[in-house]
Each structure stands twice: as structure tokens, then as C-alpha cells.
């Protein structure tokens, strides 16, 4: 996951807690999952002081952007699926998905060695049973199939389609979180005929905090034609 450089912003909730931030968005999770999420956020922010992994360095942003995104994805993943987080960056959405869906077999991939090592340390610290792969998701798919790929803030649609077209038989679905610009990305992909062997559906959308736009969840499957 690629994040923009961190910017200093005032925190509207300086004495915030994860439980309070979840409550503001009416998100209810089991206590053990809240504890794991809190441990993850703290470990992520600790690493963020040494390596730029996220701009979401308050509980409010962590919940409003990262947790909300992951919770939007998880209903579209089958029970016990093998899931590959493509370009996990600091672990979003893969780490959060594994926390709220312990039934999943999660593989977190990143081509940047420093990020992969950071996520490996974070996963170890919180005791999460997720595998971290330093390398491309395509390399994992070349040797083992997966039911679901999850992607957030990695590349435009046309690049994703080009990367994974040769491996369409190795996974069932790709779930891609996008912002308001996804329609332009779809148009660009269609112009290059990159969607001709794919079925694309907008399966969910939700408000993008701090903007008038909306995030969307796109599902891509290989065409049955």
C-alpha cells in the first residue's frame, strides 16, 4: 500500500481511545478483536516513526479509514478463504481483515523489503497468524492458488488488470478499494481493452471521511464467456 507523506494536522480527539473511535461509528467488535486492533495500531505507529507506513496516526483516522475499509471488504470474502493482500504497506487491509476474520488464511505481500520486515514485526508483536511475503503477489499465485486478492492504494485499474490477467485461473476474485476517481480508471482500462476478459462490479460504497466523495469496493472476476 502506498501512502502519501505524513502531514502534521491537529487532532480533534487528543484524548481518544480505540473504543471511543469505534463507538462514534457504531462499530461493535468482540473485546479480543478490539485489543488486537489496538495493539496493531500502536505497533504500526511505533514503526511509522522510523518508516513512512501510514498517514492515519490517530484513532479517529485509523478507524474512519482503515477499519471501515476492511469491514467493508470482509462480507465479500468466503469462510476460510486464502487471501492475498497485494502491496500491504503497513498491513491494511490484510492485518485488520485477519483480526476480524480469524478463519481466513492471510498472506501479506509487499515488494519493499523495509515494509515487509516492518509488517512481519508487527504481526509477530500482536501474535497474529498471518504470513508475510517480501515480493510480488504474482509470485505467490504462481505456486499456490488463492480465493481472494485484496487491494488498496496500490495502482490504477489498468495496471492491476495487466499484472493479474495472466494469473486469472489462480484466484476467484479481486476486491479493490478505490476512491471517487475509479470511474476514470475504468474508462482508461476500457479504452485499452483491458476489461474484455473480466467482470467488474461495484459491490459497495461508503463516505470518504473529510471529503464529499465516496470510497467504492470493486469486485473483479474472470469472464465466463
Image (cartoon, helix red, strand yellow):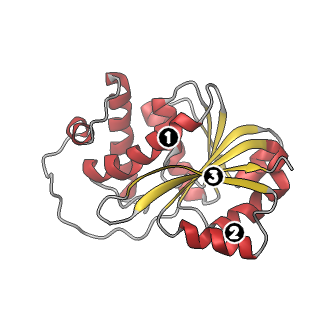
Residue in the image at 60% along x and 55% along y? 87
Task: Please indicate, yes or no, whether residue 142 appears anywhere in the rendered image.
Answer: no
Q: How crowded is mark 3: few (under 14 residues within 10 Å), some or many (20 or more)?
A: few
Q: Earlier in the sequence, mark 2 or mark 3?
A: 2
Residue 212 x/y as whole percent: 33, 66
Q: Mark 1 points at which residue?
A: 95
SS for callout 3? strand
- The 10 Å Cα crowd at callout 2, few under 14, some 14 to 19, many 20 or more, is some
Looking at the picture, does residue 212 appear above or below residue 205? below
When asked about the image quadrant of residue 191, the answer is: bottom right
Label 1 CA crowd tier, 10 Å (few <14, some 14–19, many 20+): many
Q: Position of residue 215 (x, y in %)?
A: 45, 57
Quick one: label 3 or label 1, which is nearer the N terminus?
A: 1
Which residue corresponds to mark 3? Answer: 201
Kindly identify the residue that appears in the image at 78 percent across and 38 percent down: 145
Alpha carbon of mark 2 to alpha carbon of mark 3: how far? 15 Å
Say which of 191 and 40 sits in front.
Answer: 191
| Viewer-closest of 97 and 207 | 207
Real-space CA distance between mark 3 and mark 1, rounded to the nearest whole angstrom: 25 Å
Q: Residue 51 versus residue 164: which sits nearer the camera?
A: 164
Quadrant assignment, res 16: top left
Q: How many marks?
A: 3
Kindly tell me whether residue 27 is visible in this rendering. Answer: yes
Residue 20 left/right relative to 133: left
Q: Residue 158 carries which label?
A: 2
Find the residue positioned furthest to the front.
225
Give x and y (percent) for residue 207: 36, 55
Amino acid at each position: 500500500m502506498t501512502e502519501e507523506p505524513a502531514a502534521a494536522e491537529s487532532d480533534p480527539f487528543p484524548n481518544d481511545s480505540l473504543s471511543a473511535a469505534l463507538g462514534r461509528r457504531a462499530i461493535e467488535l468482540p473485546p479480543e478483536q478490539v485489543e488486537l486492533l489496538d495493539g496493531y495500531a500502536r505497533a504500526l505507529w511505533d514503526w511509522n516513526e522510523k518508516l513512512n507506513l501510514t498517514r492515519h496516526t490517530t484513532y479517529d483516522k485509523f478507524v474512519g479509514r482503515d477499519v471501515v475499509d476492511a469491514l467493508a471488504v470482509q462480507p465479500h470474502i468466503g469462510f476460510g478463504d486464502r487471501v492475498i493482500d497485494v502491496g500491504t504497506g503497513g498491513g491494511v487491509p490484510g492485518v485488520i481483515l485477519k483480526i476480524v476474520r480469524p478463519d481466513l488464511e492471510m498472506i501479506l505481500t509487499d515488494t519493499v523489503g523495509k515494509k515487509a520486515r516492518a509488517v512481519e514485526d508487527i504481526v509477530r508483536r500482536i501474535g497474529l497468524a498471518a504470513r508475510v511475503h517480501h515480493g510480488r503477489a504474482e509470485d505467490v499465485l504462481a505456486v499456490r492458488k488463492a480465493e481472494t486478492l485484496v487491494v488498496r492504494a496500490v495502482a490504477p485499474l489498468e495496471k492491476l488488470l495487466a499484472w493479474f490477467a495472466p494469473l486469472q485461473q489462480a484466484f476467484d476474485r479481486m476486491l479493490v478499494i478505490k476512491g471517487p476517481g475509479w470511474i476514470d480508471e475504468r474508462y482508461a482500462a476500457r479504452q485499452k481493452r483491458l476489461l474484455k476478459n473480466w467482470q467488474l462490479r461495484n459491490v459497495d460504497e461508503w463516505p470518504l471521511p473529510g471529503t464529499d466523495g465516496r470510497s467504492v469496493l470493486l469486485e473483479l472476476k474472470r469472464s465466463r464467456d
